[in-house]
Amino acid sequence: MPRSLRLTLTILALAGASPGEIAADGLTAYRGSAWAHLQATSEPPVLWLGTERSVELPAAGAAGAARYDDLVLIEPQPDGRAGWAVAGVARGADGQRFLLYTGRGGEVTALPAPDRARPENRLASARWLASGGPEPLHGLAWLEASRPRGQEVWLAPLRDGAFEPAVRLVADGPGSQTALDAAVLTDGSWLLVWCAFDGEDDELVWRRRQADGSWVGGRVSADNGVPDITPRLRVTRDGAAVAWSRYDGRVYRVRTARFEDGRWSGEDWAGPADSLYPEWAGGDGTLLYFEGANRTWTAAGPASTLRFETATPTAPVLDRDSTSGLLRALWPARSGWRAEPGRSARVRP
């Protein structure tokens, strides 16, 4: 790992006591103007559907025994209740198991996990393949390994509420495979992106399942000799976009590319030096990332770029103040939510 990233992660670890008792954990999902946030280190975990409504998920056991990887929002039903799905992994004396929950409003349903050929393997990066429509959950993708740095890419289609047998999509390679993300595109195809060590550095690789069930894929970028890490996908009208951090020879910087007509293009820098942990926030293409140099979160949207001063290693929820209509950052605190207004930021990629 390059020294600059080690230093950034060390700073974040030392900053663990977040100001105002902000909870430094969680996942956030957006659909239009709606959002959901999983406060993962609560016991039991708490899923917020906006700032006023919350749902408790089943406790996973001992503190620290669970890790939650994915949260998706599903199109509301005619009754207006928001649908959601959570995927994670729990550790126990007999190995690891998936934590898979779905719900609408306050209802919580546990899904039986897909059968795995080697249940003793370690699990990571459990990701839903989700879209709109009457059957929004299409399957689950994940990484699993029988040895350190030996991750494989697996997936299990979901039909009529039950998982089909899991299949291995990509075998292990010369090094670690990490940070898997997955999406269902508007044409119904499945797109997976993750980091794979090629013997020299981490590169972004991808696979796409086409309409006939066949898979195609390759690298997102040409081999560049520098690490590319933490990809995050966003579905667009014409395909998808991916954001990630690339080492530029000194520090990491956020970069983006588009996936259209079966190929990647439009690759460019999208954040300043020392920008990390990109996330897509909302439906308008706003890109949220952490600036390690000043320990702030920046939201770069189509019309403006805002910086939020509260420093925490967990991304905030972005929403609009109901009175002013201005974008703000929210973090769950011990009592309610802490709101942080943004200030204009002149960010040059």
Image (cartoon, grey):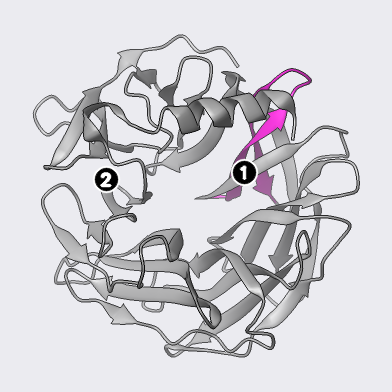
Comes first in the chain, label 2 or label 1: 2
Q: Are marks 2 and 1 in contact (CB under 8 Å)?
A: no
Q: Residues within 10 Å of mark 2 (few under 14, many from 20)?
A: few
Task: Give the numbered dot on residue 163.
Answer: none
Query: Most prominent secondary structure in the magenta stretch?
Result: strand
Task: Using the image, determine if residue 235 lies above or below residue 265.
Answer: below
Q: Give the spatial CA distance, label 2 vs label 1.
A: 25 Å
**Residue 326 spot, x, y in % from top left:** 21, 25
The answer to whether residue 83 is left or right of residue 118 is left
Task: Using the image, determine if residue 165 lies above or below residue 137.
Answer: below
Q: Secondary structure at mark 2?
A: loop
**Residue 349 spot, x, y in % from top left:** 60, 17
Quarter of the figure with residue 211: bottom right
Task: Give the numbered dot on residue 33.
Answer: 2
Q: What segment is highlighted magenta in the picture?
A: 237-260
Residue under numbered circle 1: 230
